[in-house]
Amino acid sequence: MTHSPSRLPAVLAPAAGLAPPARAAAEPAARQEGAPDDLTLWYDRPATDWETQALPIGNGPLGAKIFGGVATEQLQFNEKTLWTGGPGSPGYDFGNRKTPLPDAIAEVQRQIDRDGTMAPDAVAAKLGRPKTGFGAYQTFGDLYLDFAGAPLNPTAYRRELSLRDAVARVTYAADGVTYSREYFAGHPGNVIAGRLSADRRGKVSFTLRHTSPRDDKTVTAAGGRLTIRGALSDNTMKFEAQVQVINQGGTRTDDGDKVTVTGADSAVFVLSAGTDYAGDYPAYRGPDPHAKVTAAVDAAAGKSYDQLKQAHLADYRGLFDRVKLDIGQSTPTVPTDRLRRAYTGGGSADDRALEALMFAYGRYLLISSSRENDLLPANLQGVWNNSTSPPWSADYHVNINLQMNYWPAEQTNLDETTRPYDRYISAMVAPGAKTAREMYGARGWVVGNETNPFGFTGVHDWATAFWFPEAAAWTTQQLYDRYRFTGDLGYLRDTAYPVIKGAAEFWLDFLHTDPRDGTLVVSPSYSPEHGDFSAGASMSQQIVREVLTNALAAAQRLGVDGNFQAEVKAKLATLDPGIRVGSRGQLQEWKSDWDATTDDHRHVSHLYALHPGNQITAGTPEAEAAKVSLAARGDGGTGWSKAWKINFWARLLDGDHALKMLSEQIKTSTLDNLWDTHPPFQIDGNLGATSGVAEMLVQSQHDYVHVLPALPSAWKNGSFSGLRARGDVTVDATWKNGAADTITVHPGSTGPIRVRSGFIAGRHRVHDEKGHEVGPHRDGDTLTWNATAGKAYTIQNEAAVAVIAPAATGPDASFPSSSP
Ligand code: FUC
């Protein structure tokens, strides 16, 4: 419904045809590159610690951590496919047991049917097997730049990472000379580039060298190019990196395994790296990386630094700039480590700055660790790892972690970052189908609790984390969701559906009839890393219900697979949905009412239906029960656990509690470089926190666009633009005094659109980008109309206008709430 402008006081009536489309966030004034801004992490001393202080840059396949030392610069770097394990590694068998498992599984099912539970180690003894050849993500090593005669007491030291540019910088002064370095990882050309300069000629001198903790490579210097080449002894994976040094002025010399620049005005280096990994089962090997790495470094060396940087900025900003968030943050005048330590979660502009920075950082980290040309998605540490044996191998845990990495992708308008995820999950179908067939006697495909780049779809025997066949289904949620966000039918048909269908088929064959009530349940079933094994734990049931529902909806939408559709419908009809309110008003984690109210376990698996699923809706008794469970779990937990809780509270429409969780994460699970810490560092918490903030601003899991569903009261005035909602919609909004002021939706396709926000129940006006009134249907706080692709529709809160402008009071002050 729209109000006729003629009924408004003249002062408020918009001039017909002149109302501009509401652009939520004001465009920032032209920013001088390198000038302080609200989205820069900065420090007044060099980093001495990789994990907590060094600053990350990355372009998806390549990543580096910058230390910014004055006498020695250290760039630890990575190429994401450099992994031990897999084919070639002794004893690797994809986690598949040689003896077929179905009999042993049936035995476990019988025991659970009889006793109700089974201890994890008893199940692992029957169904598990030791992990062999799983491997671990590897550091590529470190580049060091040694500056002979570097000043002992530099002044005006600053080390920073600009999230707006994805450029890391180091500056300091000594003896009247200002020295500058900058680094970026460019997606165009797949190189990491660096430039060293000084404001006086002839002042740039250094020696470049490489080290790595493995004795498996040669390092040679020729023509100013360092070539690092070798093969991992574990699996013979070939790897190569090349770094070309180009000096402007001065001299450059090769010295065995080093390159030295002396007395230059400035110098540039470009680095690229690769391996012979390929994402194809069963060999997982492709061509020797030499040609590709050489071509990348040659091409980059043939361009000027400015050309490389402009290409990088255009590419990066093309993604990063799609979303803006203003929650009243300032440009901090204290270094980011001090800002974080001083953070209270109170009302200061500095606190807001850190919250805005955390939101933006998650987007930065996702763009930097997952791009279109990546062979692998972001792992537990994104793309960054300085070790040969990182925590949890820096692998792909699929009982929450990998999925959490991609929660912010669609919501925050970074669709491109999901390509490697799709590729990786699709590539798991072949090994996962063999595992399904041989170990479970089922069709479709499966994967367990965690996996690697080499199709590890079987099991191991760590009792509390080895069994989670629901993971395959959960990994397909993102694929179906990408279809819901984009409406891309070709993607649904060619990419998503085959993978979703396979994950659903597994469960068509592997559900078990519960003798307690005749429903279909998962058995053995294990609520991730918590309690005993049983039948029909809530998360198991919710995930299976979701994958069957999505598979059915996709098949119907595509008009395919009639028999499969019938089979899915039949199973859904008898499936236990796994959503139960227990005796203490809580949502039950298990089919039996076993929850302890004092249990603060980090996994909150039984709330899957609330988030990331959509089977529970705020305001229902089940949502109230979820609240009881969440309150019992408390506000602590690992970094990723706190991040998940931001999302949960946002889905429960409690913005204040959502912000409280973000505050807890910043205070107790965030390092000086703003990396999330489990501990140790794990990137899922960063990406989950960004998703949580997005969930506070826009939700669309129920197929309507809910704008400002969980705005915290501390974010009094603000705006955002560019967030995405399911149904191919881009959303901007502004708010004042805690109430939405304007909402603008930009539909990407033509058809019905539903927009919900609290103020819509009161006075409002809807117009398109030309100022033409739109006549939507209103139901409570929700509007529905037929939207046209490419147009922009603004919903203006007229009540807010009346409050802000006292002149509006008068005959129209009690203007009746809008009606269709
Ligand atoms: C899951 C979590 C752990 C950790 C690991 C990498 O198994 O339960 O806390 O994050 O993944």
Image (cartoon, helix red, strand yellow):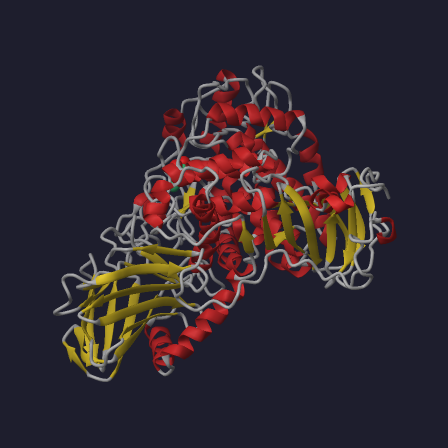
Residue 484 falls left or right of residue 440 = right
Q: Quadrant of the C terminus?
A: top right
Q: Position of residue 615 (x, y in %)?
A: 64, 35
Q: Position of residue 601 (x, y in %)?
A: 43, 28
Q: Is residue 772 above or below residue 704?
A: below
Between 717 and 786, the one nearer to me in the picture: 717
Q: Is residue 42 above or below residue 380?
A: below
User: Residue at coordinates 61% horizontally, 49% vertically from top-left?
Assistant: 481
Residue furthest top as drawn: 583
Between 356 and 675, the one nearer to me in the picture: 356
Q: Is residue 76 visible?
A: no
Kindly indicate the quadrant of the structure image that contains residue 401.
Answer: top left
User: Residue at coordinates 63% horizontally, 26% vertically from top-left?
Assistant: 622
Between 527 and 560, the one nearer to me in the picture: 527
Total marks shown come to: 0
Q: Is residue 499 above or below residue 448?
A: below
Residue 260 falls left or right of residue 722 = left
Kindly indicate the quadrant of the structure image that contains residue 639.
Answer: top left
Between 417 and 697, the one nearer to me in the picture: 697
Q: Is residue 61 above or below residue 177?
A: above
User: Residue at coordinates 63% horizontally, 50% vertically from top-left?
Assistant: 734
Q: Quadrant of ligand 1?
A: top left
